[in-house]
Image (cartoon, coloured by chain):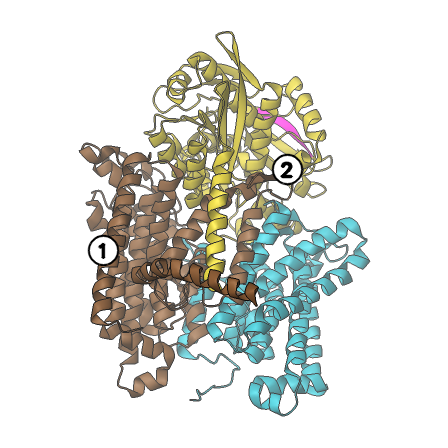
Amino acid sequence: MKILSPADKKKNTVCNLIMFAALIAVLIYIDATSLSVDMIVKVLQKGCVYAIVVVSMNLLNGFTGLFSLGQAGFMLIGAYMYSVFSVDNASREMVYSFSGKPVINFQLPIIVAIILAGLAAALFSFLIGLPVLKLKSDYLAIATLGFAEILRTIIQWDKFGRVTNGSFPISQLNTFKARLADTAFAKMSFVIPFFIVAVICIGIITLMIHSTYGRAFKAIRDDEVAAEAMGINLAKHKMISFVTSSFFAGIGGALYAVFVGSTNAAPFTSALTYEILLIVVIGGIGSITGSILASFLYIASQEWWLRGLDSGTFMGITSPIFRNGFRLVVFSVIIMIFVLFFRNGIMGDREFSSLGIYRAIKNLPGKIAGKFKKSKAEVQE
Amino acid sequence: MDYLLAGISVGGQYALIAIGYTMVYGILRLINFAHGDIFMVAGLIMVYATTAMPLYLSIPFVLLVTVIIGVTIERVAYKPLRSAPRMSVMISAIGVSYTLQNIALYATGGLAKVYPTIPFLSNTVKIFGATTKWVTVITPVLTIALVLGLVAIIKFTKIGIAMRAVSKDFETSQLMGVKINRVISMTFVIGSFLAAVGSILYFSNYPSVVPTSGSMPGLKSFVAAVFGGIGSIPGAVVGAFIIGICENLIRAVSIGGVSLTPFSDAFTFALLIVILCVKPSGLFGEKVTDKV
Amino acid sequence: MKKIFAAILCVAAICASFAGCGGSSSSSDTIKIGIFEPASGANGAGGKQETLGVKYAHDVQPTVEIDGKTYKIELVEVDNQSADDKAVTAAAELVNKKVSVVLGSYGSSVSIAASPTFKEANIPAIGITCTNPQVTENNKHYFRICFLDPFQGSVLAKYAWDNGVKTAYTLAELGNAYDLGLASSFKTAFEKLGGKVVAENFPTNQADFTSYITNAKNSGAQAIFAPTSISYAQLIIEAAATQGLKIPLYAGDTWDSNVILAAAKGKDVEINVTTFYQEGGNKEFDDGFKKWLNADSSRLTNNGGNDIVSAVSAMGYDSYFTALEAIKAAKSGDAQKIMDALWNVDYTGVTGQIKFDSVNGDAQRTVAYIKAADNTTGEWKFVKEQGVN
């Protein structure tokens, strides 16, 4: 990372504040003007959920160099932890109608349930991490993948049905909207709560990366043996990274449940983990802003912009090859292009800074003028 | 008896896929996540091939096309990343797996395809009081025959010696004049060929092909490869048979009246984790020490 | 270079977004009906057949007359990929395209996931074959024209009991609410009748059913109840045939598909299913639908390769006309008015009378059809109409 001069630092802070203010203004505008069912709202909400999970995976894979594929499993725990404590009291009997009398029959405030979800995921990751973190790269990947699959089976098992509702979905969940239904906020489309949770989570991860822990993580990533020689406790730091990452994956899972409004273990398969991993790659392994940007771009293209590829007409072109599934084919090709030719993703391991943008804009007239002069000079020659 | 027979048959099919995993890992140190999907693609090609040509032509056709696909994937997706960190290659493998599944989804339109019946293989037979298909009986025999052939290739031919050299030490063998790329291509040829044979046997037994058909057998075969000691061919075969038999036996037991059937997959993974933690080198694997 | 690439990507994406929005402008004499169905994923096959029924109905009656003015009906299709998180955005897509009423989906959990989105948008939805109680319960906007899992389970339990079955073996996919819902309802009803049930589940992506069939044999059951999705059904039938299973296989409405017939043809397996509609029940519909299917090869492919009428197609057909009835009664294409009108709709379609109860908006159905697969001709044989009592 470049070290900024004091003057630049000040400028940077100002630029950041301006950017942040602009972002908040845009969000408030969207929240106030859009309906809660508008595509832009859904995309932004889902983007927030993905951003948290993607950044948490980047912390583990990109900053610590631990190749773990357990993210879907920790999201699963988070989603269920949140859901069992958030079923609407009046509907609980109905939701659990196939599974017998529910064991947990009270509702927790939404924020408490979300934090609990993170803690549960962290606890499980600690238990899993004890044996697994000793393993080397690809073995670690396959072991965490295996744990995620085992967790899914356990949650779906009908013997735990009175808690998890077995294989049946848990619906009628508490959402931000339901919570604020009687207040002045009821007309909002509720993008902002998702953003607040995302900003807090990503903020904490960023702080962690810039702390001594973060430097230790990067040292482990770059060379384990050298890091150990420098006196970094490998087991301890790997565990901290793993547990933190899982904590936020759990919160991401809970937010996912808030987004969908019902929870079912079926979507939390290894395919979800792969999807998240591929977003990490697109954004740039080791770049937080890259991950955030990639999450929103990915969700927006998949759910919204590229939908035309499936339904027959895309960008005004109608063609028989645009039928069901074509969107996913195009997507996989884009991803493979990134993996093979732009291995560093959109951002590489650099960060996106508002100061950089400010400078680019400031220099733009000069650059254009420079080019113009240059081409003129060429003509004269 | 039924359980054992089913287990041996499934084990034979896993073995054929597991060899592909173990050979690629032995040489490139890469978990080829796309291998299970190559297996699925071989099944789909068979479905489409039989509508266009008679059976005796379509079987060699499937074997050939699968081998071409396997080698192409290596050339396109793995070769450019040879000097990249291992994580990038593995991500590329996941990307290929994702791509193959999506292409299959597009081609089939999301419908399950019925695998063609191959005469003789699909006929039923009665042995030891259990009724089953011929393919169940043939699979282990064919697997062992193919493995013996493979071991002979690796032991006695020039390319086999080169393979062993590369898996021992990648850089040194390159310096000694081994044509690395040829060796790697050959590995993928053999791996894909066996996956195609495996897919014919597997889908004759379970005649429904969907885009995700390859993922579970793929993962389990990988577990088998790890169980036997990754990089070791006899290890992969033994591991595959053990896993095949175990997962069928676990469906037969119940503890205190509670059936354990839902856990047959979970059990495989649990086994994997236990093995990895207790003896990471597997049953027949060599102990690898890290070099700085 | 990379920045340029990223910039191009962004620009392309933004262009695409405008292109996507461009198509959705509607004129005032069009009423849009959304089809919320899976075209891929685990339930792709069934979703496609259901969609075919709706599309056929649309070709039969593409307009509706309100107060002397003729309105065109436009169908808006969206693929929910049989996945819950995709269902939310797919539903939002329909809402953004300003549909007045939604039909679907095949598969209950996607309907449950999409329900809040339709609720917030105040758009009524008509479930065609989603049989889980959670879809409509406590929802004033979600209606349903089919029977529910507890009903279907009881019907099959009664049928099995009447045929002398004392012990039954149920087989369902772990994590699949439809399978387990039916299996659980069956168990409750069958045990109430005095029978014994051995219940087992298999993990997702299972291909080898040999051991399960063996377990069924060893449990001493006289029938297997396996209400699974179609792709597993093929494998279960194959395994049952290979092992010479002598006891019948029972299943719910998902098995009422020509894919099952193809799998059972020429094999010695007895298969009985409950269903919403029996081919031959309405000759005019059957003939028309077959002719329509045969007119276009892609329709035939989506129907599984032949022109056998699936019950879900008939249900799709009825759902479309139920929606039309509601539009007529509401005298408007306004979603809220249609929702209010739906409560009073009384329509007799090819699958029987459709009239919603006043609590949850479920169609009041009292009988289901039971049919059996003919192993030589590869067609369905009608067995009987079966009620709960």
Q: Which residue is mark 2?
A: C302
The residue located at (47%, 86%) in the rendering is: B288
Toward the viewer: C17 or A353?
A: A353
Colour-to-chain, brown: A
The answer to whether one can see residue C46 in this image is yes
Colour-to-chain, cyan: B
Q: Check the residue under mark 2 and report the chain it is in.
A: C
- Palette colour of chain C: yellow
Q: In this rendering, which labeled residue sits more in front, label 1 or label 2?
A: 1
Q: Amino acid at mark 1?
A: Leu
Q: Are marks 1 and 2 in contact (CB under 8 Å)?
A: no
Residue A259 drawn above or below residue C161: below
Decide if residue A198 is on the left or right side of residue B197.
Answer: left
Q: Looking at the picture, how far across and down is residue B50, in whole percent?
A: 76, 52
The answer to whether one can see residue C187 in this image is no
Q: Which mark is residue A17?
A: 1
The residue located at (34%, 25%) in the rendering is: C140
